[in-house]
Amino acid sequence: MPHDFAAWLPSEDLLTTDELMTVIGVAVSQGIDEVRLTGGEPLLRPDIVEIVHRIASLDNAPRLTLTTNGVRLPDLAKPLADAGLDRINVSLDTLNRERFKTLTYRDKFNDVILGLKAAKDAGLFPIKINSVLLKGINDDEAPALLTWALENEYSLRFIEQMPLDAGGIWDRATLITADEIFESLSSRYQLAPVENRGSSPAEEFYVDGTSAKVGIIGSVTRPFCGACDRIRLTSDGQLRSCLFSNTETDLRSILRDEKTSYESKCDQIAARFQKTVFSKLPGHGINDPSFIAPLRPMSAIGG
């Protein structure tokens, strides 16, 4: 998010916790077996521990993960684990405090490191680290990040920058590609591919002949759309088949229709889940000249 962001959604536009739980309950009944809470920053939500507890208490409860910037983890890691959270992803792009300030506009690097320790102490394993390399800013840090992750038993994944930034400044010419990331890591480590990737967005590699692994998510140059089994629910109740979709399916209007019974609402939401899954395209189209970036940035979709 840009540091001068001001386009906040009105509170009444956001799903209430009860509305959110209705949607997740329907999703689980339709076969969804993993739920990830993202943002924005999910740990800013005052009732985040309650939400985790309620999801974990569902019949046939899904695996429950959370993606965070890590700043509030020192206080929340244990309550989240106690509530039923299975594991976390933490976004961290640099090991340099000054670069961290440049990238985030906040001097919170030490809070993130303490948050990772708190997550480890709380038993939230595996702890995955998501890193995006930017040309001229942190593109020299790939080997150092991997060394640090191996020393701390974190699972590191590098992600190609996608055209979803709120500032709209993404430029293919400055993209650090999956090939470049692999080449940079190979300057220090021997990498061997892990077979049977399945629907995972990350290509994984064994490091130096050990069981330790590093992942590279080539969202732009190595799209994995054909195997993708994910759908996304925005905080204001819109269902999306893909990060890059310009089409959304409205669930909030169903939830707030006072003339419809709860059972009928659930049936309608289930039908829209099925329609959204069937509408998933075989590719995101980033590499097509006619590609149009989504109107919503990543922070508004859910990363």
Image (cartoon, rainbow, N blue to C red):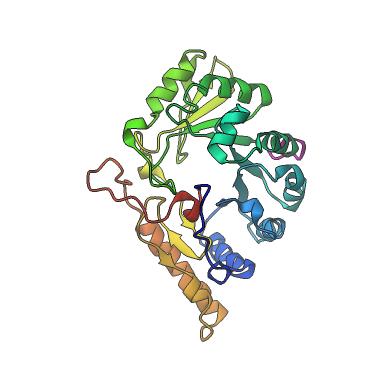
Q: Along the line of sight, which residue is nearer the eye, 206 or 170? A: 170
- Location of residue 116 by image quarter: top right
Q: Residue furthest bottom?
A: 259
Q: Along the line of sight, which residue is nearer the eye, 274 or 96? A: 96
All told, the count of numbered labels is 0
Q: Position of residue 135 (x, y in %)?
A: 42, 28
Task: Residue at 42% x, 47% y: name it.
Answer: 167
Apparent side of residue 153 relative to residue 242 in the rendered image (left or right): right
Q: Position of residue 265 (x, y in %)?
A: 51, 76
Task: Residue at 39% x, 43% y: name it.
Answer: 227
Q: Does residue 180 sit above or below 271 in this rendering?
A: above
Magenta part of the protein: which range?
119-124
Apparent side of residue 147 relative to residue 221 in the rendered image (left or right): right
For residue 123: magenta? yes
Q: Position of residue 114 (x, y in %)?
A: 73, 35
Q: Position of residue 154 (x, y in %)?
A: 63, 30
For residue 200: magenta? no
Apparent side of residue 201 relative to residue 44 in the rendered image (left or right): left
Apparent side of residue 142 relative to residue 41 in the rendered image (left or right): left
Q: Does residue 43 sit above or below 122 in this rendering?
A: below
Q: Does residue 88 sit above or below 49 in this rendering?
A: above
Q: Along the line of sight, which residue is nearer the eye, 78 or 289? A: 289
Q: Along the line of sight, which residue is nearer the eye, 125 or 144? A: 144
Q: Residue furthest left?
A: 289
Task: Residue at 47% x, 39% y: name it.
Answer: 200
